[in-house]
Image (spheres, grey):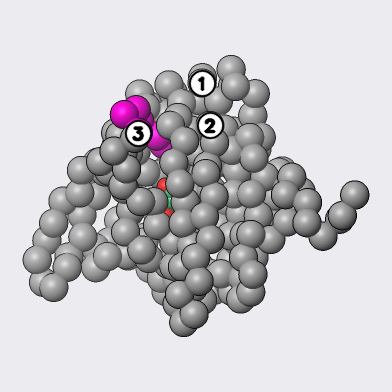
Amino acid sequence: MDLFTRTDDPRRNLLPEDGVVEYHGPILSHADADNYFELLLNDIEWRHDEAVIFGKRITTKRQVAWYADEAFSYTYSNTTKTALPWSPMLRDLKSIVETACGETFNSCLLNLYRDGSEGMAWHSDAEKDLVRNGTIGSMSFGAERKFAFKHKQTKATVSQILEHGSLLTMKGTTQTHWLHSVPKTKKVMSPRINLTFRKIRQPNV
Ligand SMILES: O=C(O)CCC(=O)C(=O)O
């Protein structure tokens, strides 16, 4: 066996340089992932996301929610959100992700994509509210979608399909050197929910 060309190693770094992205694959049984997906759809306080682009406020079709240990504020796309307290289900998911990746998190941004017509444009999660080079743990539920990376300088690209109940981690200098996106697609007709567990820098005022 050629150890250097294995593709099924969960700790294999997907990026060729300047960061670490690990795809762990599904970390929940299909039945557990189905249960969490239904609970997330129904129990999360979903709101359409907002962004201010060139001074104009826009509302996205995609819906979001922001939960954390405290009422942390998080500013991205020139708008600020204040965190809601964890629900028991989100606490469970946080602990599952923390155990799987050996990290701790104090917050979670959730995104709901109704179908492939909703996506997320190229960006990096390097806002000043986040701990610099802090790990991000990303769990996905529902429809499989492509998650793409593009190097800010070389423009090299890498992508990974994110499965139902799966975990992907972004570590180290990934956010400094790479953009990521969820491309829109006509092929996906069903919803997907993504949770990104994050570390907000404290004190957060
Ligand atoms: O939906 C996803 O998989 C990624 C979401 C994302 O890029 C983000 O929350 O910054």
Q: Earlier in the sequence, mark 2 or mark 1?
A: 1
Is residue 205 depicted above or below 71 in this figure?
below
Q: Secondary structure at mark 2?
A: loop
Instruction: Identify the magenta region.
Output: 188-193
Which residue is denoted by mark 3 in the rendering? 188
Q: Secondary structure at mark 1?
A: helix
CA–CA distance in space, label 2 to label 3? 14 Å
Amino acid beneath label 1: Asp
Q: Magenta segment: does it hold 162? A: no
Query: Could you tell me residue 188's position as x and y percent?
Result: 35, 33
Task: Mark 3 and mark 1 in contact? Answer it, CB < 8 Å.
Answer: no
Residue at point 29% right, 33% down?
114
Where on the picture, by quarter, is residue 75? bottom left
Where on the picture, by quarter, is residue 115? top left
Where on the picture, by quarter, is residue 4? bottom right
Task: Pick out the residue farthest to the right.
Answer: 1
Residue at point 53% right, 61% down?
158
Residue at point 25% right, 41% down?
117
Q: Is residue 109 visible?
A: no
CA–CA distance in space, label 3 to label 1? 18 Å
Which residue is denoted by mark 2 in the rendering? 164
Amino acid beneath label 3: Val
Amino acid beneath label 2: His
Which residue is denoted by mark 1 in the rendering? 34
Nearest the viewer among 154 and 1 is: 1
